[in-house]
Image (tube, helix red, strand yellow):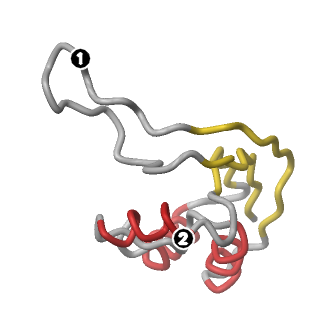
């Protein structure tokens, strides 16, 4: 997402009641994946827990994490059938993602 504050503000405008979102966060300090995210022209604001919660708050949301679990994430290997083909760009390095169910009001 290139402009996360605009997205969150628009969601706040159109959502009546509660917004539930399933998302994942990269670990704070994951420099290699953060550099790759920035290199793709994306904002890291919603991809790290602290900055995501801050972004929600700045957009007028009261947000809390209802549930979370962690899971190992590896880069998707390139295709062996279609030379150079890849499914996902992220993560670029092995990491542990924090999968969360968010509730925003």
* Total count of labels: 2
Q: Do labels 2 and 1 touch, CB within 8 Å?
A: no
Check the picture and name the quadrant holding the C terminus: bottom right
Badge 1 element: loop
- Residue extending furthest toward the bottom: 58
Q: Where's residue 42, x and y in %? A: 36, 68
68, above or below 105, in the image: above
Return the disc, 2 or 1, that comes first in the chain's sequence. Answer: 2
The residue to which callout 1 is attached is 80
Q: Where's residue 104, x and y in %? A: 73, 62
Q: Residues within 10 Å of mark 1 (few under 14, many from 20)?
A: few
Residue 3 lies in quadrant: bottom left
Residue 99 lies left or right of residue 7; in this view the side is right
Residue 15 lies in quadrant: bottom right
Residue placed at 65% from the left, 74% from the top? 56
Q: Residues within 10 Å of mark 2 (few under 14, many from 20)?
A: few
- What is the distance, in whole Å, between disc 2 and disc 1 at their CAs? 29 Å
**Foreground pick, 95 / 55:** 95
**Foreground pick, 75 / 44:** 75
Residue 15 lies left or right of residue 89; in this view the side is right
Residue placed at 82% from the left, 45% from the top? 68
The residue to which callout 2 is attached is 31
Residue placed at 65% from the left, 44% from the top? 22
């Amino acid at each position: 997402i290139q402009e996360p504050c605009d997205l969150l503000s628009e969601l706040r405008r159109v959502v009546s009641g509660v917004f539930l979102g399933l998302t994942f966060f990269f670990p704070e300090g994951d420099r290699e994946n953060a550099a790759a995210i920035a290199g793709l022209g994306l904002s890291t604001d919603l991809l790290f827990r602290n900055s995501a919660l801050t972004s929600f708050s700045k957009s007028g949301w009261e947000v809390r994490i209802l549930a979370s679990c962690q899971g190992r994430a590896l880069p998707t290997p390139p295709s062996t059938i279609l030379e150079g083909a890849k499914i996902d760009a992220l993560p670029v390095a092995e990491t542990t993602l924090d999968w969360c169910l968010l509730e925003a009001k």
